[in-house]
Image: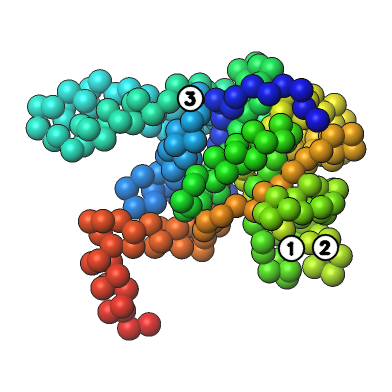
Amino acid sequence: MATNHKKITKAVIPVAGLGTRFFPATKAVAKEMLPIVDKPCVQYLVEECVKSGIKEIIFIISKEKPSIKKHFQTNEKLSKLLKEKNKKEELKTLKELDKLAKFYYVFQDKPLGDGHAILCAKKLVKNEPFAVLFGDDIWDSKTPAILQLIQQYNKYHSPILALEKIPKTDTKKYGIVDVKSTKGRLSELKNLIEKPDPKNSPSDLAVTGKYIITPELLKDLEKATSATTDKEIRLIDGMRKHIKTNPIYGYEIEGIRFDTGDKLGYLKAVTHFALKNPSLGKDFKTYIKSLDL
C-alpha cells in the first residue's frame, strides 16, 4: 500500500494526440478543442477538476497545436474589446475562465504512448499522488467523476481507476479488469487485460480515461518501459507491474459517460448537453421531435 497520503491537488491531462478520427477538423485544431455546445471538450475536464478540489492542472500538449494553451491563457486584448462593447456576460465568462486553476504546459514531442505522456509531467507532480484525465472521457454526474475516485483514494491510499460496465460484446475495444474482490462499486483488481476477445474476457468492467496515480505507481511505470516492443510506454504496463506487489482498485463511476474521441460518442455528448442547456434545451428538443427521419 502507498505510504504517501498527501491530498490530491494536481491533475495531468494528456492532449497531445493527433485526433485522426476527426480529420480534417483536427488538422489545425486539437481534438479536445472541438465544442460541446459552447465549451470545448477540454474545458469540461478542467471544470471537473476544479469542482473536485484540484488547484493545478498540467497539460501534456503538442507544439503543433497551441490552441489549448491559448484557450486557458489570459487575453487582455479580448478583455479590453469586450469591455468597450459592453459585453458583460461574455466578459464575466472570460474572467471565470482566467481564474479556473493554475495551468502548466509540457510538450510531448513524439506520440510515444499514454504512459510516456504521464511521465512527461514527472517533475511537476513531484512526489505526490495526482489525477489523470484523458481528453476523450466526459461524464455527466452529480458528483464529478474524478472526485468519486479521489474519495475512494482517501480511504485506501492506493492507485484507483475509473470503471464502466459495458456490453460483453464490446470488451475487444477496451482495457478490461480481472477482479479479485468487490464491495459495492469498488473492486480490488487482480489483473488488467488489453482488449480481450469477449469469449476470454474476465469481466464486463472496462477501464475508462480517469485515474489516481501514486508516486509508487509512477516509479513502476518508469521501470515498465523496457517491456514494450514498439517503443511506446503504456500506463497499463506500469499498472501490471505495480499490481504484483501493491493493491490497485477500480471504481464503477456513477453517471453517464461520453466517448468524445468517437464521432458517434461526440454527437451524443453534443445532443445530451444541448438538451440540458437552459437557453437551448426546450427549442432543441422541439426541433428534434419535428425531424421526419
Residue at 67 percent across and 36 percent down: it is: 155
Residue at 44 percent across and 36 percent down: it is: 51
In this image, 201 relative to 274: left or right?
A: right
How far across and how far down the image is residue 243, in percent? 85, 38
How far across and how far down the image is residue 58, in percent? 54, 26
Q: Which residue is mark 2?
A: 201
The vertical placement of 107 against 247, above or below, is above
Seen from the viewer's position, the closer of residues 191 and 37 is: 191
How far across and how far down the image is residue 5, in percent? 68, 24
Identified by mark 3, the residue type is Lys
Dot 3 crowding, Cα within 10 Å, few <14, some 14–19, many 20+: some
| Rendered image quadrant of residue 99 | top left
Q: Which residue is mark 1?
A: 204
Identified by mark 1, the residue type is Asp
Residue at 50 percent across and 23 percent down: it is: 56
Mark 1 or mark 3, which is nearer the start of the sequence? 3
In this image, 121 relative to 280: left or right?
A: right
Q: Cα distance, mark 3 to mark 1?
A: 34 Å
Residue 7 visible in this rendered orientation of the protein: yes
Q: Determine contact: label 2, label 1, CB under 8 Å.
A: yes
Identified by mark 2, the residue type is Ser
Q: Secondary structure at mark 1?
A: loop
The N terminus - image quarter: top right
In this image, 271 relative to 234: left or right?
A: left
